[in-house]
Structures are given as structure tokens and as C-alpha cells.
Image (tube, coloured by chain):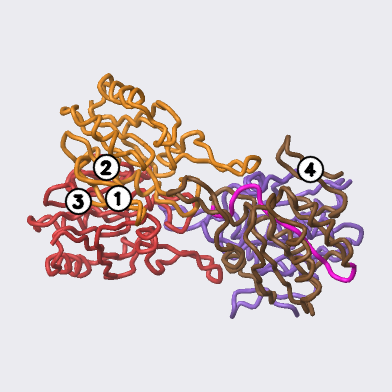
Chain colours: A red, B orange, C brown, D purple
Amino acid sequence: MDDVLILTTGGTIDKLYFDALSTYQVGDSVVDRLLQTARVKLPYRISELMRKDSLELTDGDRAEIAAAVLDAPERRVVITHGTDTMTETAQALAGIVDKTIVLVGALAPARFAESDATFNLGMAFAAVQVAGPGVWIAMNGTVFDGSKVRKDRSVNAFVGA
Amino acid sequence: MDDVLILTTGGTIDKLYFDALSTYQVGDSVVDRLLQTARVKLPYRISELMRKDSLELTDGDRAEIAAAVLDAPERRVVITHGTDTMTETAQALAGIVDKTIVLVGALAPARFAESDATFNLGMAFAAVQVAGPGVWIAMNGTVFDGSKVRKDRSVNAFVGA
Amino acid sequence: MDDVLILTTGGTIDKLYFDALSTYQVGDSVVDRLLQTARVKLPYRISELMRKDSLELTDGDRAEIAAAVLDAPERRVVITHGTDTMTETAQALAGIVDKTIVLVGALAPARFAESDATFNLGMAFAAVQVAGPGVWIAMNGTVFDGSKVRKDRSVNAFVGA
Amino acid sequence: MDDVLILTTGGTIDKLYFDALSTYQVGDSVVDRLLQTARVKLPYRISELMRKDSLELTDGDRAEIAAAVLDAPERRVVITHGTDTMTETAQALAGIVDKTIVLVGALAPARFAESDATFNLGMAFAAVQVAGPGVWIAMNGTVFDGSKVRKDRSVNAFVGA
């Protein structure tokens, strides 16, 4: 099936600011709104799996993500994910060889006027259509092989590894 | 060379609104600002070829675009372009077989808060890295083969043809 | 009655871009969305009178605007209006002495990411609460006496006159 | 002197999001950029006093704010401020009787696409021109007497008191 499945797991891309707490938390996913603004006509389905900062993701969470990918009828899967452990989830999905999986997130919340979220989601949406089976990471203007990339905290960016 | 070249030719994506005339015109390209907001780290170069509504593009303009693609050292080329004649330019570039060319534009100006421009540019940037040689069009959430797509004015969207 | 009435008449503030026509036209008013984003708690009512570029407003239209102000139960009235003939409408309303009327518009459409619309509407909303009876124009960061201001096309801004 | 002085003290209006820390902090003030986008022509001066969450403001900080207001040549002063203790600062300024002072902030950071910051700043800018001497608070679409308002945390809004 050539439709695109989008699994949301949380991360900065979906963070809200709560004034009462003076803090950020993961809120409703912005993905559907972004896809509508982008006038996407390719059929897609969005499924919210969890709302977590990626530092809080457990092995059990990663098993749940993998199961959701495997169980889905779609062969093309975009996963929105926090950036801090995105590469760990890429590793956990590496055994799935017959689907194209693209992990994507943002370094600034999508609700910010100046965020990388929309561009990154556009990258992920194209990569999931064009790239072959395997796990990919779309960040910082680059489509990385999911096993050959790391987040370099010193520059707050993903770099080839 | 794996850097990305971005040729800008005008179109809705770069349109400004001039209050004094109550009209729009193609303005400075927003592409560089969008790529900076997206925190793109992949090396790229932007070259402004022209600032035209695509209905005004002549055969001579298309020859100039083709020459710019051919003369460039980069093998990966994104072209921002008005949507009305994007497929005609795709045809004019069809003879270039050793480069990956992605045409992209927007149905609403990038300067709008609600525009498809940023998402589309993200798609184009990913497609130009991942797709093989040939001419592609990235619009409406889809990476189309440039020879198998048309703009359907009745729905104001690109559809497979 | 201390509620605020907002009459919308069109102008750049509400302009949309129509790709199919490559032109701008007055669209649905953005005023209600802007007031919700601003978390306005003061009671208000919005009434759409017309959707015109202010260069197209006739004496009859101005009479209709004046009648809408006079007939309203509210004593505080904000009017969104195109900028080119805003001062003419201010003159047409000058005879209404027991209401506070603030004319406001924008030099760039509110749908633009970079527009003066939201700030201007905030100014108008404050001025209509604080200013005494009479006709005021809130533009370019200034609350002008409606009879002592003109739009200077050479600088595309309102200046005291 | 009829110019407007804007004192910035921090608060949500200027909050940034730092991905590396998954936290927010008060960043460079956005006020000047907002006033430029709004095409403000009225002369103004911006002075950054501090960058604090308003829960962290001390009596000493409030004394410093009061001194800055008193020492300024301008009679019209806008103060950007966190919302949690805005009314306390209003009290601390209540003794200044010959200047018009408007406190303003935001419930969502100005860097958000959907924030009340720009509208509120517009309200403050108009109120400081139109209102008489005294201390005012411009929030939630309302210009409040600074001594007759409180932030109701249960609804996350300012209400008359």
C-alpha cells in the first residue's frame, strides 16, 4: 500500500508552552495541521503512539513503535520523534527490512514562528516516497542513513557518523 | 559534486504584496531565509536566474534555465518556479539525463503565515538528495515524475497524469 | 454599553492571494481569529458590512457605515478599513459625537507572517476603550485624531496633518 | 517629551526554547522586531533592564524599574514584564503620578506563531499615548487600571478586581 503512515511519539516538534507552569510539555500533535497547510494530496494516516520527550523513551516504548510499524498495512512510515534519542530508535527499527521508515523531529517547536519543523516534515514526506526500504533520518536539511548519523550536542545538529 | 544548487526563477513562492499598488510582484527570494530557519547544514548555493510569473516565461527563459543546470558543477539542482507552467519547464529539461533536478513552487506566497512553501522546499531538498537522475516535481505532498504530472486548475493542485 | 463592536469593510488587512488568478482579493475577515489568538476577554461583536478595496468605496457605502455605527447599541466601535481612503471615511463619520470610533487597517495582509495587522488591531482595541468620543485612526504605531492625519503614499505611512 | 520609552524586564513574552536543555529561558527581547514589523513611526527608545521570569523579581528589581521610569526623560513608558507578578510591579509604581505607565506581557512567547504578544504590545502602545497619568495593565484585550486587576490562574487570564 502506497499511502503514508505517520506515527507521532512526542518530542520538541509538538511542544507547547504552559504559562501557568512556565514550562514546555508535549501537546497535541501539529502534524495534521502542517500537512493541511502544505496542501498535501497524497493519502496519509496519522496515529499518535505516545507523547514523550525522547529522553524518557524506554525499550518498551521502542518495542511498541516497532510493532506499530510492523503491524501497519502501509509500507511507507514517517515517525515524528524527539531528537535526543532518535538514533537509538533508528537502531531498534533496523531489523525491519521491507518498509521505508523516516524518523523526523525538530530542534524548535513547530508552534514557533521560526522552526525547522515544517521543512523537516516536508523532507520526511518526500524521502519516504523516494527512498528504498530501510531506516532514514531527515534533519538539518539532510536525509541520513539511520545507522550513520548522530546528534552532535555541541553544535545542536545532526551530522554524519 | 554533492552540494545542492538552487536556481530561483520567480513565481508565487516569492511574491510580495505592494500596498501602494494593491498588487503583488515577485520580490527577493525567500529561499535562503527558509533554509536558514530550517537549520540546513548540507552545503548549498543559491543563484537567482530571473523573477517572473511563470506565465511570462519564454522559450528563451527555459533555454537559460537549462543552460544554468548544465553549466553548474552541482549534479543536484532544485529550481523554484511558478506553478502554472512548471510542467513545461520540466519538459524543456527532460534531455538532461545525468543530473537530479527537482522543480518546486508554492500555491501561496512563502511570506504568508499559512503557505505550502516551506514544506514544499523541504520535499524538494530531500528528493534532490534521494531521487535518481531525471526531472521531478515536488508539490502537494508528492514527488512526481516531471513527465507524468499536470496542474489541475479546477482543484488548484498537481495531480498525476 | 461597554462592549466593543467591530465593523469590517475590507481592505488589505483581509486580503487573500488567489493563485489561480495571480491576484489578491478581500477574503473572509481575519479579525475574529486574531482576537482569539490574542486571548481577548472583553466582550465584542463582529459585523461584516462589506468586502471592498477602499478605493472602491462609494458615498453610499460610507453612509451605510455611518448608519451601522449609529444604529449599534455599542458606544465603542472599531472599523477595519482599507488604508487609501480611510481618512475620507473618518470625515464621513465626524458628525457622530457620542461614540468612540477607531478606524484601523494594515499595510500588509494579516495573512502574511510579517504584517502590521495584529499590532494595529491591538492599538485600535485599546484606543476604543481609552479614548474619548470622536473618530480616531490607529496606524503606524500612532493613535491619530481622525481629522488630523493623511496617508503619505511616498512613504507608504500615515502622518500627522 | 512625547516619545515612548519601552523598558524590558523579561517574562514569557521574550522566552526562547533551548532544545539542548529541553527548557526555556528569557532571550533577546523581541520588542524591537515587533515594532518594526508593525511599521511604527512614533519615536521610541528601548532599554533592557533585566531578563527575569517575573516570579524571580525582587523588591530591589522593582526599585530599579521605578528608578528607570523616574529618571527617564519620556513621560510615556511601556514596561514588558512577566505576567505572574505584573500587578505587584504595578503597585510598586503607583506612587509615580506624572507619567503614563503601561505594563504588558504575554501568555505565550512572542516567538510562537500563535501568541498574544504582538496584539498586547499594540494595546500598550496605544494606551500609553491615550491614557492619562497612572499605571495601566494591557492584557486579554483590556486596558485595566493597574490597581484594579489580578491574574486569575484558574483561567490563565487577567480579570478586573
Specify the amino acid type for callout 1: Phe
Q: Are marks 2 and 1 in contact (CB under 8 Å)?
A: yes
Specify the amino acid type for callout 3: Gln
User: What is the C-alpha distance between the residues marked 2 and 3?
Assistant: 13 Å
What is the number of the mark on residue B137?
A: 2
Q: Position of residue B132 (x, y in %)?
A: 16, 37
Name the residue carrying label 4.
Answer: D43
Name the residue carrying label 3.
Answer: A129
The mark closer to the camera, 4 or 3, is 3
User: What is the C-alpha distance between the residues marked 4 and 3?
Assistant: 53 Å
Residue displayed at 29% across by 58% down: A41
Q: Is residue B139 visible?
A: yes
Q: Is residue C136 left or right of residue B137?
A: right
Tag 2 and tag 3 share a subunit: no
User: What is the C-alpha distance between the residues marked 4 and 1?
Assistant: 48 Å
Name the residue carrying label 1.
Answer: B158
Instruction: In this rendered view, identify the residue nearer to me: A17 or C8.
Output: C8
Q: Is residue C105 part of the magenta span, yes or no?
A: yes
Local packing at callout 4 (Cα closer than 10 Å; few below 14, some 14-19, many 20+) is few
Local packing at callout 3 (Cα closer than 10 Å; few below 14, some 14-19, many 20+) is many
Specify the amino acid type for callout 2: Ile
User: What is the chain identity of the residue bearing mark 1?
Assistant: B
Q: Position of residue C97 (x, y in %)?
A: 90, 67
- Quarter of the image with the C terminus of chain D in it: bottom right
